[in-house]
């Protein structure tokens, strides 16, 4: 007579799942435990302050040229593409306000986070993956060093702090690119353009975008470190870690942005 004990119930349900769904849930669980370990290691000393500062330089300063160029082109193109439609309806004077709100609220944080996911996420995934397959992480454990705190916690803190700063700088550069596009098509002074931009925006436009950029940075750091720290299959796994870090972190940015928009709208109705 078969016996179905409580201990066999969970394995039965797991084995009954489709393979893709089971792998997805296991990946989510492992990533959540990885993030939970980060908080445990982050709260207690010793603190690797020097490594955090170095990673902030590597992640923030070295990403600034790419972020600045991308933001400048975004502001320029968005203005040039929007102007003909506004001119058709006789609303050209609303162009600075429309572009400013669009960049500050949504386009700036999301596009810059995606750029950083491609550059920073792949870099972290490849770097930690190389350390994993060459057994550098194992050597750190043998020598008595906590590799998780040194190479993971420092990178996640750096991405969480640097992505919001890159978003602010990128927004400013994008607005300047928009000003140049408006200036090229008409006589608008620098003061008048930015007066219209800031007159039409409020703290409720800037604060949610700034807050969600912290979550974007945290997601990029966690996914990049998780993929690299758990890299397998030798040198082939390094490329897989870098690629999957970019794909998963980019997808997670869109999910977080969707959640942030819903929360912002909910509090806006209250």
Image (cartoon, rainbow, N blue to C red):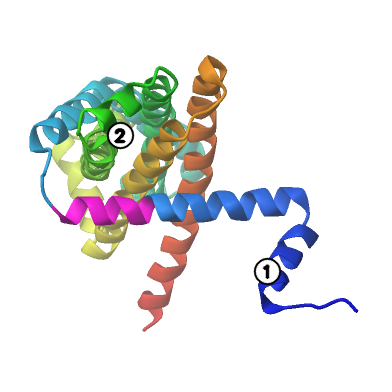
167 or 256, which lies in front?
Answer: 256
Q: In the drawing, does residue 183 fall left or right of residue 55?
A: right
- Could you say whether the residue bearing mark 2 is in a helix, strand or loop? helix
Q: Nearer the viewer, mark 2 or mark 1?
A: 1
Q: Quadrant of the C terminus?
A: bottom left
Position in image of residue 41 (x %, y %) = 23, 51
- Which residues, given as a range, are shown in magenta? 35-44
- Front-most of 133 and 186? 133
Which residue extends farthest bottom?
270
The kind of secondary structure the magenta stretch mainly shows is helix
> Looking at the picture, how far across and down is residue 62, in whole percent?
24, 21
For residue 214, the mark is none
Q: Residue at x 42, y 40 (%)?
A: 226
Q: Name the residue furthest front.
A: 1
Q: Residues within 10 Å of mark 2 (few under 14, many from 20)?
A: many
At numbered mark 1, what does the secondary structure look like: helix, strand or loop?
A: helix
Identify the residue under disc 2.
174
Residue at position x 41%, y 70% in the image: 263
Question: How many callouts does the rendering have?
Answer: 2
Number of residues whose C-alpha sits closer than 10 Å to that of mark 1, classed few (under 14), some (14–19) or many (20 or more): few
Residue 99 in sight in this render: no
Of label 2 and label 1, which has the lower sequence position?
1
Q: Quadrant of residue 66?
A: top left
Q: Quadrant of the N terminus?
A: bottom right
C-alpha span from label 2 to label 1: 52 Å
Magenta run includes residue 37: yes
Residue 239 magenta-drawn? no
As drawn, is 85 to the left or to the right of 100? right
In the rendered image, which residue does mark 1 sit on?
Answer: 10
Is 195 drawn above or below residue 11 in the view shown?
above
């Amino acid at each position: 007579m078969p016996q179905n004990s409580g201990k066999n119930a969970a394995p039965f349900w797991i084995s009954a799942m489709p393979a893709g769904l089971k792998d997805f849930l296991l990946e989510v669980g492992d990533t959540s435990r990885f993030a939970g370990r980060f908080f445990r290691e982050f709260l207690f000393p010793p603190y690797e302050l020097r490594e955090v500062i170095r990673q902030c330089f590597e992640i923030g300063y070295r990403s600034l040229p790419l972020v600045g160029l991308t933001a400048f082109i975004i502001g320029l193109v968005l203005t040039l593409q929007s102007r003909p439609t506004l001119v058709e309806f006789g609303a050209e004077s609303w162009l600075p306000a429309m572009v400013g709100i669009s960049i500050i609220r949504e386009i700036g944080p999301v596009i810059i986070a995606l750029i950083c996911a491609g550059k920073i996420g792949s870099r972290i995934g490849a770097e930690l993956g190389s350390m994993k397959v060459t057994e550098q992480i194992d050597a750190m454990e043998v020598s008595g060093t906590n590799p998780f705190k040194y190479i993971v916690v420092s990178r996640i803190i750096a991405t969480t702090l640097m992505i919001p700063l890159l978003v602010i700088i990128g927004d400013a550069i994008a607005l300047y690119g928009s000003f140049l596009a408006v200036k090229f098509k008409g006589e608008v002074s620098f003061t008048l353009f930015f007066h219209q931009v800031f007159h039409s925006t409020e703290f409720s436009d800037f604060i949610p975008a700034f807050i969600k950029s912290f979550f974007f940075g945290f997601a990029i750091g966690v996914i990049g470190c998780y993929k690299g720290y758990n890299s397998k299959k030798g040198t082939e796994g390094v490329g897989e870690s870098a690629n999957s870090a970019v794909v998963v972190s980019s997808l997670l940015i869109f999910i977080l942005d969707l959640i942030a928009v819903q929360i912002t709208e909910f509090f806006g109705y209250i």
